[in-house]
Image (spheres, helix red, strand yellow):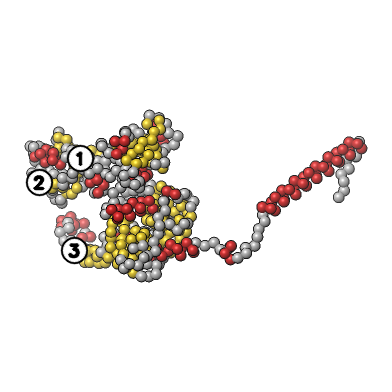
Amino acid sequence: MRRPDFSRFFPLPVADAIRHMVVMACLGGLLLVFAATGAATAQAVKEVPGSRAEIQYSFAPLVRKVGPAVVNIYARAEVTERRASPLFDDPFFRRFFGDVFPGEARKRTAQSLGSGVIMREDGLVVTNYHVIKGADEITVVLSDRREFDAKILLEEERTDLAVLKIETEGENLPYLAIRDSDELEVGDLVLAIGNPFGVGQTVTSGIVSALARTALGITDYSFFIQTDAAINPGNSGGALISMDGRLVGVNTAIYSNQKGSGGSVGIGFAVPSNMVSTILDGVEKGNVVRPWIGVSGQTMTPDLAEQFGLPRPVGVAVTDVYPDGPAANAGIRIGDVILKVSDREIVDEQALRYRVATRPLGSEAQIEILRGGTHQTIDVSMRAPLTQPEPDLTDMRGQHPMLGAQVANLSPAFALEHGLDDMARGVVVLKVTRRSPAARVGLRPGDVVLKINDDTIDMVSKLEPALMSANNAWRISIRREGQVLTTEIKG
């Protein structure tokens, strides 16, 4: 390589000095290049795999372990249908004759297909309530194709879960252990196992896409694990498995493109295993009793968060506290903001219901609240819903507008049992006989009677005397879906 000649531009001593500086700079650059190349070479060293095991990546060992504990479920029910006359398609005919001629009755067998998970070696199986709803016969098919008749031990529409029992004649079956679903994190690998479209046991893989999905309207306790593992019709009741081979959820629903095939689009939902644990405990005790603290509230919005001085919209602003309930006894008040239950953040009212419902009955939960700009932690007992007052179930009789209605006193336990608002107090309408005076004035099941004329009605025992003393003029006030409605009737 030719050396650079600077003598044409500088006197000889200066040119020699410049040449020396250039040579040293080049040597320094080369040393840096060699050092960087050496480091990169050290990091990029790769070895040829020494065996097939070193290059094989498979879920097969995990599936072999857990697959036998996932079953197929076939449910059958006999339903009666009425085939109406073609004349009923004519609006003119229906106007004059209505439903006088109901049509020919015929029976058919309805079938549903789903999946289930063996949770105990003696044949205890968990599935979805909607898979076995109304079934007259249920057949459980194991992965080895053996079939067993099953009976329902417990079913709960509020969580869309049911527990079945098959008789194994002393044989121990493979079963799945439960993992704490609160240990899951977004991004964790999971497997979904079930019987989609009735093709037989199928395994799909994916990740946990999201946690604590609420406001889906699927169950009363809307709090779901979202996954992109393919879940299709027939997967309902199947297992969502973590990489340690334990159950973290029961596959329940999918988000489907209604204009398409109705299959998976990569958004599936599973009931968390912690909720499954509560229904299994209910089997042991004979019925499911979940903790209840007696509060309701409003999910925090950005505007509310600003008013409460919160940096972001999180928590539930308490709007009602049930008298003598666990929350009231612990000191929680209207206006408090519930932020956490046992260190778990509360993002909305559904999350609050779930966190309370999955706590052990009889334990205490540390509830973090915001009150007057100050954070506090309050210990609240996890108690069963109050059972007082007694229902006093009554069929209304007499010459008044509520003849034909069945009413009862509301308690939190009674309300939850009948799918009503557990914070409501007073007298509730349970049934209304068709074509009765109660039906004609527009009463509906779920209405809460507030007043008859000027008499406040808070017990069934006060209702009939108020109706009978009205002197053929009744002003009835009720609460329906959060609204107060009043009607006036004259005899």
* Quarter residue 250 falls in: bottom left
**In front of the other: 237 or 282:** 282
Q: Which residue is mark 3?
A: 103
Q: Residue at x 80, y 45 (%)?
A: 27
Amino acid type, mark 3: Gly
In this rendering, is residue 245 above or below 9?
Answer: below
Report, in whole angstroms, how far the alpha carbon at label 1 lies from the one at label 3: 42 Å
State left or right for residue 69 relative to residue 34: left
Precedes in sequence: disc 1 or disc 2: 2
Residue 251, position in %: x, y? 39, 56
Q: Which residue is mark 2?
A: 397
Q: Nearer the viewer, mark 1 or mark 2?
A: 1
Dot 2, crowdedness within 10 Å: few (<14), some or many (≥20)?
Answer: few
Q: Which residue is mark 1?
A: 426
Q: Residue at x 15, y 37 (%)?
A: 452
State left or right for residue 470 relative to residue 330: left
